[in-house]
Amino acid sequence: MNPALVDTNILSLFFRNQSLVVKNFNAYIQEYGKINISIITYYEIVSGLKHRDAQRQLTSFLRFVSYNRVLPLTTDSTTISGNVYASLRKKGTPVDDIDILIAGIATAVSAILRYILSAEKVEEEGVEGRYCTS
């Protein structure tokens, strides 16, 4: 299992106690000690919970974050994201800026970080217990 950067969709499944995701998180923590999320994922979760006034879930999320790792945006990661964005735009491929920023963070921290189950794999194949690059 490689070090991973967890995206927002997978983190949401974890907090909904999706059994396979919880199992994979537990195995990952056994090997690496902490879960990695991006500051973008942190923002998406906090803003969504605050919008819904979900105080109990917000408290749970903040407790989770205190035991794990939030990776920041940096000039390196945003430069990588800018390059990806420009390349995709030239090809006519629309991609959400948030996904590109998360990919830039993952790449900037040495390209060994991977998403645990990309959002596309969740939609296409259901939640499986395998790890994949995104």
Image (cartoon, grey):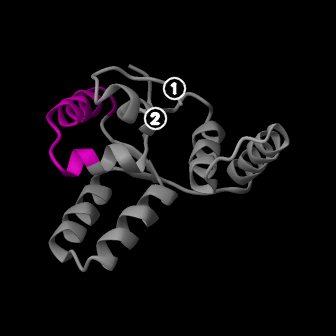
From the image, give the main secondary structure of the stretch colored magenta.
helix
Residue 107 lies, in percent from the top left, at: 63, 37
**Residue that appears at 19% across and 66% down:** 57
Is residue 15 covered in magenta? yes
Q: Secondary structure at mark 1?
A: loop
Residue closer to the observer: 88 or 4:
88
Magenta span contains residue 44: no
Quarter of the image with the N terminus in it = top left
From the image, tell me which residue sits under label 1.
Answer: 133
- Mark 1 or 2, closer to the camera: 2
Could you tell me the amino acid type at mark 1?
Answer: Thr
Q: Is residue 75 above or below residue 1?
A: below
Task: Identify the residue at the far right of this view.
Answer: 90
Location of residue 42 (image quadrant): bottom left
Q: Looking at numbered disc 2 in the image, what kind of residue is underneath it? A: Glu
Name the side, left or right, on which 105 lies relative to 75. Answer: left
Q: On the rendered structure, is 92 left or right of 40?
A: right
Of 23 and 125, the residue lying toward us: 125
Residue identified by numbered label 2: 120
Q: Quadrant of residue 116?
A: top left
Viewer-closest of 78 and 3: 78
Q: Distance from label 1 to label 2 (Cα)?
A: 11 Å
Do the residues under discs 1 and 2 have CB atoms within 8 angstroms?
no
**Residue toward you, 93 or 6:** 93
Using a 10 Å C-alpha cutoff, classify the residue at mark 1 as few (fewer than 14 neighbours), some (14 to 19) or many (20 or more): few
What secondary structure is marked by label 2?
A: helix
Residue 35: give x, y in percent of width and height. Answer: 35, 42
Q: Which mark sits nearer the N-terminus, 1 or 2?
A: 2
Q: Position of residue 12 (x, y in %)?
A: 29, 51
Q: Is residue 50 above or below residue 75?
A: below
Magenta span of residues: 13-32
